[in-house]
Amino acid sequence: MKHRISTATALLFAFFVFTIPAHAADDEAELLKRLNPEAQEFFKQSMAVRAEYPENHPYKHFNRDRDNNSEIDTMDADGYLWLVPIYVPRNETHTPVMYRLVKDCKTKKTIERQIIDISYGYGNVTLTDRYQQQCIQDGTMDNYYVESSSPPDGE
């Protein structure tokens, strides 16, 4: 017995297939809407740079757990991710903090803004621009950190 699908059924199926977000860009479009205008400009730049990364690149997708606390990290309205490393006891005041920009080695454009709670200590903090170390000396030319104890200007 042959089965035929009705036009209405086919249209309904097509509606569901094409309206269910199936790509990380859809999630990032939602993140973009929640940001203030300056942060939107930063995040659009981040999206454009990361679009060129291969699928297996660690910074390709924005929605992920960076501090290993089993939660997807969220951005504030200024485009900063607030991270508290799981191996560091939580501090209710979240001070002192380190501001970290994650930048692309080739374009030197910021792809991620982070505020990290370092109140109980945190290894591997230099509070400097790490381009030379993380792009040139290690030879990977992927991403590097710019760390500071105060918010960076114009980023």
Image (cartoon, rainbow, N blue to C red):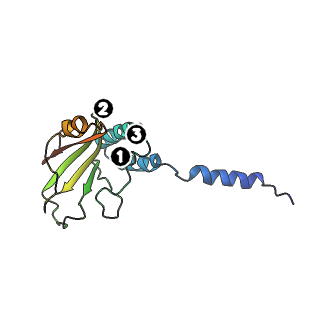
Residue 112 to residue 20: above or below: above
Name the one closer to the observer, 122 or 76.
Answer: 122
Secondary element at image label 2: loop
User: Where residue 96 appears, x then y in whole percent?
Assistant: 12, 57
* Mark 3 / mark 1, whichever is N-terminal: 3
- Dot 1 or dot 2, earlier in sequence: 1
**Residue underneath mark 2:** 107
Determine the residue located farthest toward the right in the rendered image. Answer: 1
Asked if labels 1 and 3 touch by Cβ distance under 8 angstroms, the answer is yes
Q: Amino acid at mark 1?
A: Tyr
Instruction: Name the quadrant of the N terminus.
Output: bottom right
Q: Quadrant of the C terminus?
A: top left
> Pointer 2: residues within 10 angstroms few (<14), some, or many (20+)?
few
Which residue is the site of mark 3? 53
Task: Please indicate, yes or no, whether residue 154 appears anywhere in the rendered image.
Answer: no
Residue at the spot 33% in from the left edge and 38% down from the top edge: 41
Residue 91: percent from left, percent from top = 16, 66
* Label 1 close to label 2 by CB (< 8 Å): no
